[in-house]
Image (spheres, coloured by chain):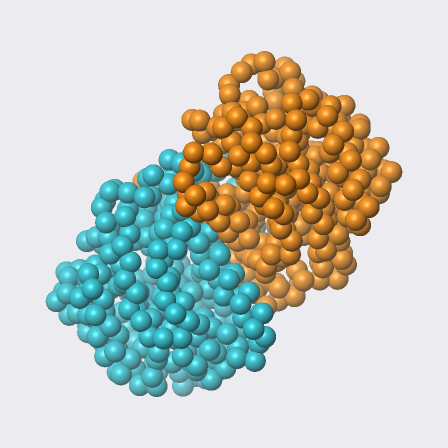
Chain colours: A orange, B cyan
Amino acid sequence: MNGKTVIIGLVQMKMAHSPSANLGKAAQMVEEAAKKGAQIVCLPELFKSEYFCQTQDDGNFKLAEPIPGETTEALTKIAKKNKVVIIAGIFEKRAEGIYNNSAAVIDADGSLLGVYRKMHIPEDPTDYHEKMYFAPGEGFKSFETAYGKIGVLICWDQWFPEAARLTTLKGAKIIFYPTAIGWCPKDSDELKRNQLSAWQAIQRSHAIANGVFVASANRVGVEENIDFWGSSFVSGPFGEEIAAASPSKEEVLVAKCNLGDIEKTRHGWPFLRDRRIDAYKGITSRFVD
Amino acid sequence: MNGKTVIIGLVQMKMAHSPSANLGKAAQMVEEAAKKGAQIVCLPELFKSEYFCQTQDDGNFKLAEPIPGETTEALTKIAKKNKVVIIAGIFEKRAEGIYNNSAAVIDADGSLLGVYRKMHIPEDPTDYHEKMYFAPGEGFKSFETAYGKIGVLICWDQWFPEAARLTTLKGAKIIFYPTAIGWCPKDSDELKRNQLSAWQAIQRSHAIANGVFVASANRVGVEENIDFWGSSFVSGPFGEEIAAASPSKEEVLVAKCNLGDIEKTRHGWPFLRDRRIDAYKGITSRFVD
């Protein structure tokens, strides 16, 4: 995979109320990305519905579906037809009372490579009630796709350097972040700027610390109390911005990732060589009181 | 300490060939910071000499000194007189053949609180031959100073999220990074911009991920093959820039840190609550082959 160029696509979309409409639009946008040359395409988190976690409502569990299920079956056809890998954020029902915020990874031949289940689950008193809906995932993963080994993490995971590190140690060369994050419309412009800037900085830092590509696909549009800020982007292993989308428009963002940059960057800045693995045990502590 | 404001000072200085001249200038600049109100002042890494690690030369070991020793004795007087905490990067001799790249922490009453020894040691084929000179440190630390609990990490440590995390888990509210980093003058402007930008992003990311203040004190000036890029800065726990110095001038940078911002930021973004300490064990692996 070293030296190879991989073209990736990020789907930045606005969600309608109807899940079938969202699925149809997502399929179209994946095909558009494929036409632009994309080989691996990432959809946003929970792309088939509006972001229902703004309220705590048992009724929303009926939006969940198994994997494989209706969504992966539809996307499997698109993947096979267009020879693209698809990363799809899905509200997964594994059993009665066991639901996950998941991402299915479908390979370019249409086979289901696996499922990543969001490890870090947020709970915010106003806008993000995820702990009510989702069981936490059970491990970090990488996936050997037709176009190279990738990792998937989901939204809140992006604030945790441990998640990106563990995904890198499993061999991922590109880490995808299906995302649903936005502003509270009543916040000040300064707060909004700082939030977006922090979100960009922390994800670029994962690229830098690990010498990997990072690609984040967010939704756009206002849904109740959240103005989803789009700004989907791709960072190279040096933390350099390769491509970035607008904060409010639907877009198919396509970027070329020269995987040879990973080795070059890691030779120049050999952080993975110098990690003090003998001294990191305390990372599994909550706090040292 | 919550709600308290702490004023910190970063000394950005150019080093002369003479260690005693550097010590004299450092003492002056600490006093200048104190006059501007600083309560905790950080000197750059190995501030008493030019950056000798550009060459591998046994003769440089004679620059090393014990802690306590000449440098801490001089700074102790300055600390006591001005009631300031001083963080001083020192080439430490612990025994024949055991040398460390260290930072002494001197409390505001002049007592030596402790020593942090650089954990991550770089080795770059052209400019940074540190592995020849320095034994790696033996642990991450925090220090309870007169003005609050702080952490100290040194230069190359700043690229490792584990270091900032472990220092935070030991209670540090502000992490100081005495630093010696610069450009290779023959590199392209684009590469230089990307390097500086990555250096800023990774350190801001530690502030964000951990909800702490981060303060980095770098040297300036050209020494042989390195153009030290200054740009010493302070980031708030939201990743926002509070103060920043120029890339090439000697400066005493003073910044006000409202420690109440830590709790506020951690309530809004409760990453420390949501860390998956049950799933981070793999952090102590080099790689998962």
- Quadrant for residue B16, please give it: bottom left
Residue A38 % position (x, y): 77, 48
The residue positioned 33% from the left and 39% from the top of the image is B263
The image quadrant where one finds the C terminus of chain A is top left
A145 to the left or right of A190: right
Q: Is residue B201 visible?
A: yes
Residue B136 % position (x, y): 43, 64
- Front-most of A253 and A57? A253
Q: Is residue B215 visible?
A: no
The residue positioned 34% from the left and 86% from the top of the image is B17
- Quadrant for residue A152, please give it: top right
Residue A251 % position (x, y): 68, 43
The mark tally for this picture is 0
From this view, report whether residue A276 is shown above or below residue A43: below
From this view, report whether residue B263 is shown above or below residue B156: above
A79 to the left or right of B7: right
From this view, report whether residue A56 is shown above or below residue B210: above
The image quadrant where one finds the N terminus of chain A is bottom right
Q: Residue furthest left?
A: B81
From this view, report whether residue B25 is shown above or below residue B213: below
- Front-most of B253 and A165? B253
A85 to the left or right of A246: right
The residue positioned 27% from the left and 48% from the top of the image is B258
Residue A44 % position (x, y): 65, 36
The residue positioned 74% from the left and 32% from the top of the image is A25
